[in-house]
Amino acid sequence: MSRVRTHAIALAAIGLLALSLAPGCVVGALVGGMAESAHQAGSTMIPAAYAGVEGKSYAVVVSADRSIQAEHPGLVEHLTQRVDRLISENAGASGHVPAQTVLSKLYNNVGWIALGRGELGERLGVERLIVLELNEYRLHEPGNRYTWEGVATGIVQVYEIDSGLPDEPLYEQAIRVAFPDQMGILREQLGQSVVTSALSQRLSNRMAWLFFDHEEPNAIEY
């Protein structure tokens, strides 16, 4: 047996002996730390919060105040398209109105906002109308443009157009996401496109994930 191998075996034996002689709390802390590390590196399967899209046709509508749309042009389109894509690929729906078709119909009917949800769903020809009422979307605190502190909040509602209550949301969930995860990130450290891209991705994930089983990293920040 080589001298190097003999030395390695001796060191391993010393390590095992030290561990066996260590107080129980030390061993417990070590094992607990290893378990926590493994948990953080893993993921968990999260069931759909609302499974009523499966086997049904649907359309996604995003509603945002004009001030939000003016400050973040293209945001409504991006959210509509990404949420629609994620749901169509994962929720087992029987069909859907493509996001671009929904956007075109809404833009060509300026009075759509005044329509009852049931009528809007009927005009779109779907059984489920998924609506995001976007309440807030900002990249920094009001009055402080030196550091990034992005926040997006909204209410997700589902209208079952084929039910007896097409104008009443039969599922409703508030969602909130933020980016960056650390405080005090300066504008010089991250570009605006990076911040708004990450924030909109987190928002669309949180909205779409409500409708299908999905895997989330245990260490997820949002």
Image (tube, rainbow, N blue to C red):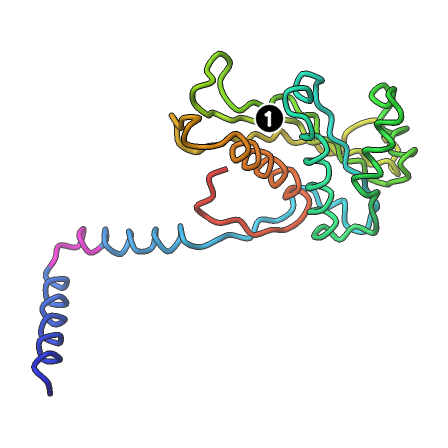
The N terminus: image quadrant: bottom left
Give the camera-side residue of 117 and 165.
117
Residue at the outermost bottom position: 1
Against 130, residue 44 (above or below) is: below
Q: Is residue 26 magenta?
A: yes
Magenta stretch holds residue 28 = no
Residue shown at the point (12%, 57%) measured from the top left: 22
Q: Identify the residue shown where x is 34% and y is 51%.
A: 36
In percent of width and height, residue 18 lies at 10, 63
Badge 1 crowding class, 10 Å Cα cut-off, few under 14, some 14 to 19, many 20 or more, is: some
Side of 170 where 32 appears, left or right? left
Magenta span: helix, strand or loop, mainly? helix
Residue at screen point 11% across, 72% down? 13
Q: Which residue is mark 1?
A: 153
x%, y% of residue 103? 81, 33
Left or right: 115 with respect to 70?
right
Residue 156 position within the rendered picture, expressed as x and y whole percent measured from the top left: 69, 31
Residue 24, how many percent across, how many down?
17, 55
Does residue 190 appear to the left or right of 71 in the view shown?
left
Compared to residue 5, the image places residue 76 above or below, namely above
Q: Residue furthest top?
A: 143
Three-letter residue code for mark 1: Thr
- State the count of labels: 1
Q: Which residues are magenta?
A: 22-27
Quadrant in the picture for residue 14:
bottom left
Vertical arrangement, residue 110 with respect to residue 13, above or below: above
Which residue is at 14% across, 62% downward? 19
Q: Nearer the viewer, residue 76 or 192?
A: 192
The image quarter in which residue 78 lies: top right
